Image (cartoon, rainbow, N blue to C red):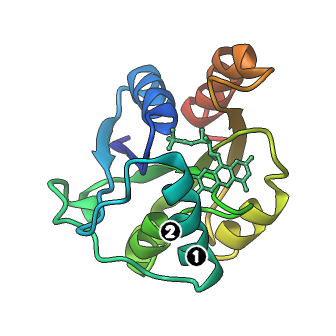
Amino acid sequence: MKRLVVYYSLSGNTEEAAKKIAEALGADLLKLETVKKMPKSFAAQIIVGGGQVVFNHIPRLKPMDKDVIAYDEIILGSPIWNSKGVPAVNAFLRDRDAAEKVTSLFFLSAGGDTEKGLEAITKQLPNLRNSVSLLDRKSKGSEENGAKIASFTEKILNGK
Ligand SMILES: Cc1cc2nc3c(=O)[nH]c(=O)nc-3n(C[C@H](O)[C@H](O)[C@H](O)COP(=O)(O)O)c2cc1C
């Protein structure tokens, strides 16, 4: 089984989880990057990123160095922005062949409600079987991320 972990991460939390998940699965990693950079300050990120979510902005992605179609299964990771998945992930899912390969999804949030985010992304993923909601390293409860990742990757390895 050839697996690819695809993710977007602005401040490193989703990246940290993506690396752990890829290691547990023996999977390759692909980081999504937008052509236009996000601002550096958190306040500006909230304004720009929040606005992009509200207006359903689909950003241009930098060229990817992996051929996603060559993989059997994709594990997708997204931070939660404004209770939804991020614009870069929505841009990636415009490729319907790639969207069909996604079986598993992991989210990073600061502790807000992830139900809406899950709903907005899952309707684009016809073959989704597993999902896990993880917490930002600054949030209470993030110490459980490791155990959640272990059970998430075990399900994937068992083909569930
Ligand atoms: C633009 C923006 C909007 C956000 N909106 C939410 C939100 O609605 N709910 C929440 O729990 N966290 C929200 N967060 C926090 C991130 O989901 C959280 O910090 C996550 O760990 C970031 O992942 P990253 O470090 O991989 O970028 C938001 C962060 C940003 C930058």
Residue contact between numbered discs 1 and 2, judged by CB atoms under 8 Å? yes
Instruction: State left or right for residue 44 relative to residue 2.
Output: right
Front-lying residue, 70 or 8:
8
Q: Is mark 2 within 8 Å of ligand 1?
A: yes
In the depicted view, which residue is nearer to us: 37 or 23?
37
Tell me the quarter of the picture where residue 33 sits. bottom left
Q: Amino acid at mark 2?
A: Val
Percent position (x, y) of residue 28? 29, 37
Quadrant hosting residue 47: bottom right
Q: Could you say which disc has been placed on residue 51 in the image? A: 1
Q: Nearer the viewer, residue 126 or 149?
A: 149
Residue at 44% in and 52% down: 74
**139 to 4, vertically: above or below:** above
Q: Nearer the viewer, residue 51 or 64?
A: 51
Look at 71% across and 24% down and name the residue there.
148
What residue is shown with label 2? 48
Q: Which amino acid, mark 1?
A: Gly
